[in-house]
Amino acid sequence: MAPASDGTNAAAGCRAEDRGEAHCGAVIVVPGESGTVIGPDAVLIVDDGGHGPVTPTRMQGRARVIGGLRELMAAGTTPTLASINGSHGITLARDGRVVGVITVQVGGGMLSTIWVVSNPEKLRHWNAG
């Protein structure tokens, strides 16, 4: 996706100079300083079916959430805006295959809960066809 006029990538929330760095898509739609839209008590819940890099699969606090998201954003991961269960979300793809989907809950104008499904069994329909 082409960068917007302000230098961000609409799908990833990345400044042009940040693209390619692991933190770029990990903070979801942060056009400036990392973590500014993630609430201080935010919770990250990862359903990886035991197949993922993030341990533990539930963590709380801005720094821990950002760290967990960074782990999920391996090199070559492409975030894309998508409709997930009827809500706005982000898919994470590598080598043309969806490897994760992200949905969020907003509270107080900041991200309060971030759900990531990276369980291959639950992603089969994203990669069918």
Image (spheres, grey):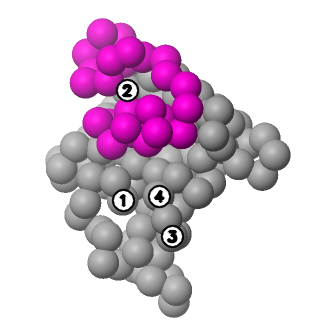
Secondary structure, mark 4, is loop
Whole-angstrom CA distance, mark 4 to mark 2, is 23 Å
Whole-angstrom CA distance, mark 4 to mark 1, is 9 Å
Which of 128/115 is in front?
A: 115
Whole-angstrom CA distance, mark 1 to mark 2, is 18 Å
- Find disc 3 in the rendering and name its residue: 32
10 vs 93, left or right, is right
Secondary structure, mark 1, is helix
How would you rate the neighbour count of disc 3 (Cα within 10 Å): few for under 14, some for 14-19, many for 20 or more?
few
Residue 24 is tagged as 1
How would you rate the neighbour count of disc 4 (Cα within 10 Å): few for under 14, some for 14-19, many for 20 or more?
some
Q: Nearer the viewer, mark 2 or mark 3?
A: 3
Q: Which residue is drawn at 35% across and 78% down?
A: 16
Q: Give the range drawn in magenta.
A: 48-72
Q: Which of marks 4 and 1 is in front?
A: 4
- Find disc 2 in the rendering and name its residue: 118
Whole-angstrom CA distance, mark 3 to mark 1, is 10 Å
Mark before the other along the chain sequence, 3 or 1: 1
Label 3–label 1 contact, CB within 8 A: no
Mark before the other along the chain sequence, 4 or 2: 4
Q: Nearer the viewer, mark 4 or mark 2?
A: 4
Label 4–label 3 contact, CB within 8 A: no
Marker count (numbered): 4
Q: Is residue 115 magenta?
A: no
How would you rate the neighbour count of disc 2 (Cα within 10 Å): few for under 14, some for 14-19, many for 20 or more?
many
63 vs 37, left or right, is left
How would you rate the neighbour count of disc 1 (Cα within 10 Å): few for under 14, some for 14-19, many for 20 or more?
many
Q: Quadrant of the N terminus?
A: bottom left
